[in-house]
């Protein structure tokens, strides 16, 4: 038994399988609970795996040797967002003005509000720099945070927290605001909560997904420009 | 399937190399998405090749965030005294950004008179 365990612990096979299995369990839980937004399949899988790693005393680096194959696909998946965007190009062109307005308002609100709240809570400059780009996709957020003197690890965590918040809260929040336009719903979530919010948008509606992917891409660019400027105000 | 994967990876690779060499403030895959969009507009054949693979990946987008989420969960206990204010700031700010973005879209769409057309 120890021998088998030490073999498996050296191989990516075990934790890659565990990641896929945990996700399938997450999907089953999501469906069993009536597809409630808070029962996000990704969140269920993360919690299961984090518990499993803690129980088996497995370091994250060992886990990631297996999970990296899944993680790697984030890049290709971003490229694939071009397809729903292509399918919706006439609608994107038609909505050019609302898209630009929502991009500017959503991006500025995401950065300014986290900085204002951070200041109100008495967070120091390094923490403020780590939080400022939290709505952007991880690659941009981490780059901006480093450039501003923040902590890449904390930023990576808070990008994940942002995505999770968007994925869980978007549906009830937008319902409460009585926003029924799938373009507005998807785009706002993509701008505020990057790829994770986009993944949730695809779960709900293809139009929302396409516009969320566009919002994620555009806010990656805008956050890289705005976060350093707006941090200067605090 | 292999040609589709190669096309997708080639867009990402070109995006990564270009953003690095030109020092652009966007991630390589986002530029890769723009390149892919240009390719899809130019070539019906490319659309047919890429579609099944892209659909498959996009249907399972949520899976791809699991490894990074496991990493984040593992670090949660190492954040120290500021954990609660940081999380509160991030959660509230995200809710505000979604609200502001969606309301701004709705208001601008009404002003511009661009109601949504039915899904394709």
Image (cartoon, coloured by chain):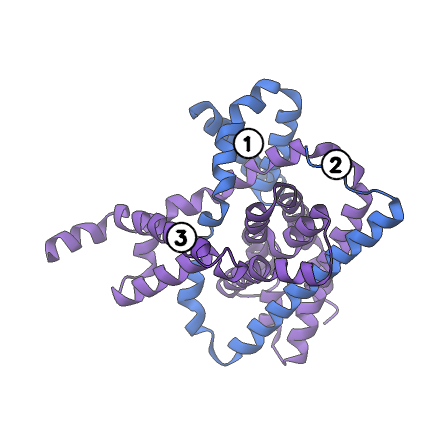
Chain colours: A purple, B blue
Image position of A211 (left or right of A29): right
Q: Are dots 3 and 1 on a single chain?
A: no
The residue singled out by tag 3 in the image is A28
Q: Quadrant of residue A13?
A: top left
Instruction: For label 1, count other residues whose C-alpha is less than 10 Å away and answer few (under 14), some (14-19) or many (20+).
Output: many
Q: CA distance from mark 3 to mark 2?
A: 34 Å
Which numbered disc, 3 or 1, marks the residue closer to the eye?
A: 3
Say which of B40 and A174 sits in front: A174
Chain ID at mark 2: A
Q: Are marks 1 and 2 in contact (CB under 8 Å)?
A: no
Residue B60 placement (x, y as % from top left): 47, 43
Image position of B120 (left or right of A11): right
Position of the C terminus of chain B, as image quadrant, is top right
The residue singled out by tag 1 in the image is B11
Query: Mark 3: which secondary structure?
Result: helix
Q: CA distance from mark 3 to mark 1?
A: 34 Å
Query: Mark 1: which secondary structure?
Result: helix
Say which of A142 and A82 sits in front: A82
Q: Report the residue at 43% width, 56% height from top.
A: A32
Q: Earlier in the sequence, mark 3 or mark 2?
A: 3
Which numbered disc, 1 or 2, marks the residue closer to the eye?
A: 2
Residue A1 placement (x, y as % from top left): 10, 56
The residue singled out by tag 2 in the image is A91
Which numbered disc, 3 or 2, marks the residue closer to the eye?
A: 3
């Amino acid at each position: 038994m120890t021998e088998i365990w030490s073999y498996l612990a050296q191989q990516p096979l075990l934790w890659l399988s565990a990641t896929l299995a945990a996700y399938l369990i997450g999907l089953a839980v999501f469906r069993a609970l009536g597809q409630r937004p808070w029962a996000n399949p990704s969140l269920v899988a993360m919690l299961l795996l984090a518990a499993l790693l803690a129980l088996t005393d497995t370091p994250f680096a060992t886990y990631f040797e297996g999970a990296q194959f899944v993680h790697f696909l984030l890049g290709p998946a971003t490229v694939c967002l071009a397809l729903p965007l292509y399918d919706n190009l006439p609608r994107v062109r038609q909505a050019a003005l609302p898209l630009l307005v929502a991009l500017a308002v959503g991006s500025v609100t995401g950065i300014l509000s986290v900085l204002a709240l951070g200041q109100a809570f008495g967070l120091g400059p390094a923490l403020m720099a780590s939080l400022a780009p939290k709505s952007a996709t991880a690659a941009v957020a981490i780059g901006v945070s480093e450039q501003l003197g923040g902590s890449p690890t904390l930023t990576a965590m808070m990008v994940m927290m942002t995505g999770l918040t968007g994925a869980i809260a978007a549906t009830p929040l937008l319902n409460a605001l009585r926003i029924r336009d799938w373009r507005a719903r998807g785009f706002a979530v993509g701008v505020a909560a990057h790829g994770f919010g986009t993944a949730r948008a695809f779960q709900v509606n293809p139009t929302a997904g396409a516009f969320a992917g566009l919002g994620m891409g555009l806010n990656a660019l805008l956050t890289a420009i705005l976060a350093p400027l707006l941090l200067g105000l605090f | 399937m292999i040609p589709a994967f190669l096309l997708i990876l080639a867009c990402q690779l070109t995006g990564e190399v270009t953003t690095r060499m030109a020092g652009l403030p966007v991630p390589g895959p986002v530029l890769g998405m723009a390149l892919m969009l240009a390719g899809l507009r130019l070539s019906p054949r490319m659309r047919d090749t890429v579609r099944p693979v892209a659909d498959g990946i996009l249907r399972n987008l949520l899976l791809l965030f699991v490894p990074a989420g496991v990493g984040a969960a593992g670090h949660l206990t190492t954040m120290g005294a500021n954990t609660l204010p940081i999380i509160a700031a991030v959660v509230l700010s995200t809710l505000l950004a979604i609200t502001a973005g969606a309301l701004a879209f709705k208001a601008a769409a009404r002003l511009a008179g661009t109601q949504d057309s039915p899904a394709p």
